[in-house]
Amino acid sequence: MRNWLVFGILAALVIIPFLIWGDWFMNLFSEDGAIELFQQYGPWAWAVAFLLLIGDLFLPLPATVIMSALGYLYGPLWGGMLAATGSFLSGMLAYGLCRSLGRKAALWILGEKDLKKGEHTFNKNGGWMVAISRWLPVLPEVIACMAGLNRMDWRKFVIALACGSLPLGFVFAYIGYQGVEHPYVALVVSAGLPPVLWLIAQYFLRQTMR
């Protein structure tokens, strides 16, 4: 029960700033606006984009628009790598911050019963949740935090996060590079990649752990 309560609180912390400042950030970071902003920083544009993608953990920033702008500026390959890395680092920060609270703090927040349930759930099915959530609104930050709080195995988390972040970064960088206005097919096909990648990665991870 406490896991769901914490989940709801974290979701509210993501949603409320979006409801308050979301329109302002969306107008500020339209695709053209993001491109113009990055161009002002010249060779350091990628670093600014990294900071913004990581800042999406705390502020209602349109991460996919930033990724598209990276594709426009750096092309689908390097732009994709930068976008995927930024998404990956954001997830790692959320996971790391919550895991660094320690087991005692997790016990205090969740209680022994809920923590045991959460640890079991995230170590059994957390990879699916982490990989798939990168494509969904609100959930990427919340799931990463919950994975850290419930002490999901870090190897599983890192690999699952990569399975979700890589397709996300490369697809939106490609969209920004090509200037695609209605990329529905690309989005639908690519959104199906994270669970497929995790399925493959899970097999090799099990072989390695054995």
Image (cartoon, rainbow, N blue to C red):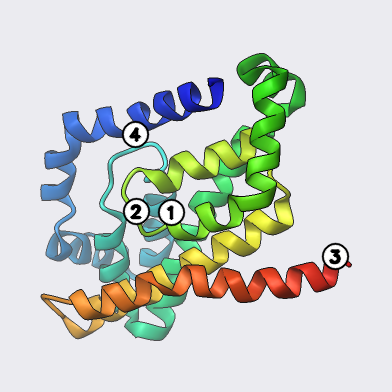
Which of the marked residues, 3 or 4, is nearer the chain's N terminus?
A: 4
| Residue that label 3 marks | 209
Q: What element carries label 2?
A: loop
Q: Give the secondary structure at mark 4.
A: helix
Q: What element carries label 1?
A: helix
User: On screen, 38 above or below 201?
Assistant: above
Task: Note whether residue 43 is visible.
Answer: no
Tell me the CA gap for discs 2 and 1. Answer: 5 Å
How many neighbours does mark 4 have within 10 angstroms: few (below 14), some (14-19), or many (20 or more)?
A: many
- Kindly identify the residue that appears in the image at 41 percent across and 23 percent down: 9
What's the residue type where badge 2 is placed? Leu
Label drawn at residue 136: 2
Q: Answer above or below: position of 103 versus 199.
A: above
Q: Nearer the viewer, residue 43 or 180?
A: 180
Picture quadrant where residue 181 is located: bottom left
Whole-percent x, y for residue 180 in the image = 15, 80
Q: Which residue carries the number 1 mark?
A: 133
Residue 95 sits above or below residue 82 on the image: above
Q: Which of marks 1 and 4 is nearer the N terminus?
A: 4
Q: Are marks 2 and 1 in contact (CB under 8 Å)?
A: yes
Q: How far apart are marks 3 and 4 (CA)?
A: 35 Å
Q: Earlier in the sequence, mark 3 or mark 1?
A: 1
At label 4, which amino acid type do we have? Val
The residues bearing labels 2 and 4 have C-alpha atoms spaced at a distance of 13 Å
Q: Residue at the right extreme?
A: 210
Residue 37 appears at what percent x and percent y?
22, 59
Q: Is residue 102 left or right of residue 163?
A: right
